[in-house]
Amino acid sequence: MSTATVPTTFLIISDTHDFTPTSAPIFPLHLPTPKADVLLHSGDLTSVGGLPSFRKALIMLASIPAELKLVIAGNHDLHLDPSYRTESLPANPAPGNNPQDDERPDLEYHTKATGLMKGELARQAGVTYLVEGTHEFTLASGATFKIYVSPYTPEFGDWAFAYAQSEDRFNTPADMEEGSKCKSIAINPIPDDVDIVMTHGPPQGILDLCAAGNVGCPHLLRAMKRVRPMLHCFGHVHEGSGIEVVDWKVKEKEAAKEEKEAMGRNGGARRKNEAVHRAFEMEWVENPYPGVWEWRVGKGFRKGETTLAVNASIMNAEHKPRNTPWRVVVDLKRAG
């Protein structure tokens, strides 16, 4: 008699930014990588987009063995964003990444870029490129899961897939805080029944700490509190690379206590935000790669109560590929 769940191994990476691993063990991500059932790449395949870089990324992903390879864009993957305009490109792009390498107007170039990520080279690499929304997959093992993905992050500089700080992409108006001055622009809000969330950026206060402070999205945090998925993976903030077990009941108590103390010391929204930041401080843990982090029933995971957050940025703060991938085993539902 088959069990109701199937142990499934995920290899999680992000922010590879044109990096190509080799067999030389110079950096943590090197070949061969340990086999996984599913590869998740949370965006920033490239530094400034460009068809040559997208081709290079697909060739890199082809070298990683996995039955299913799910990939999203990030803010640096400029030409995968249909609303991005190449006149906004940074000056002096990296060699081989100039959009003039291929004819275009902008939308034509975007069409070529997405065509490449969904075309024959991607098929040969085993890559499934996902756009914002909810997707369902079933593996050969019978394991099935529902995943929500989004490449969008709060606006920062002149990059792709951006939304204003006052805009909420992840929650409907009914899910927003009463009296909020933010506007819901959610075309694809995160549904309550997803198993996995993969975004390019982190939620506020979870593996998002850098020199500028906690730069994650508060609206995404609100959605994570509501949905409480089994796994949430992201990148974007290179300094935040790591893993955190989020116990939502504990976090809510910590946040409420810190908020009360902060408000009592002078009050105000700024103090409230500072309280949220402190309550969600990251805890560093050792990465067992190429071994696995077991996130299973009886080993940390409690449905509806805990989420494993993974910042899988491969590049570090100095833009060197010195961060380690994460390999995680979870129990997925068996189809049928």
Image (spheres, helix red, strand yellow):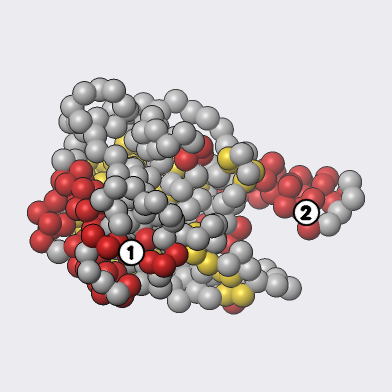
Mark 1 is on which residue type? His
Neighbour tally class for label 2: few under 14, some 14-19, many 20 plus, Cα within 10 Å: few
Residue to which mark 1 is pinned: 79
Give the image location of residue 197, x and y in percent.
Answer: 41, 56
Tell me the residue at 21%/23% (across/down): 24
From where the camera sits, is residue 264 visible?
yes
> Residue 139: horizontal and vertical position, in percent?
18, 54
**Mark toward the start of the polypeptide (2 vs 1):** 1
Q: Residue 124: which quarter of the image? A: bottom left
Quadrant in the picture for the C terminus: bottom left
- Residue receiving disc 2: 270
The quarter of the picture where residue 37 lies is top left
Q: Secondary structure at mark 2?
A: helix
Callout 2 touching callout 1 (CB < 8 Å):
no
Answer left or right for 301 relative to 275: left
- Compute the Cα span from label 2 to label 1: 36 Å
Q: Give the residue type that dot 2 points to.
A: Arg
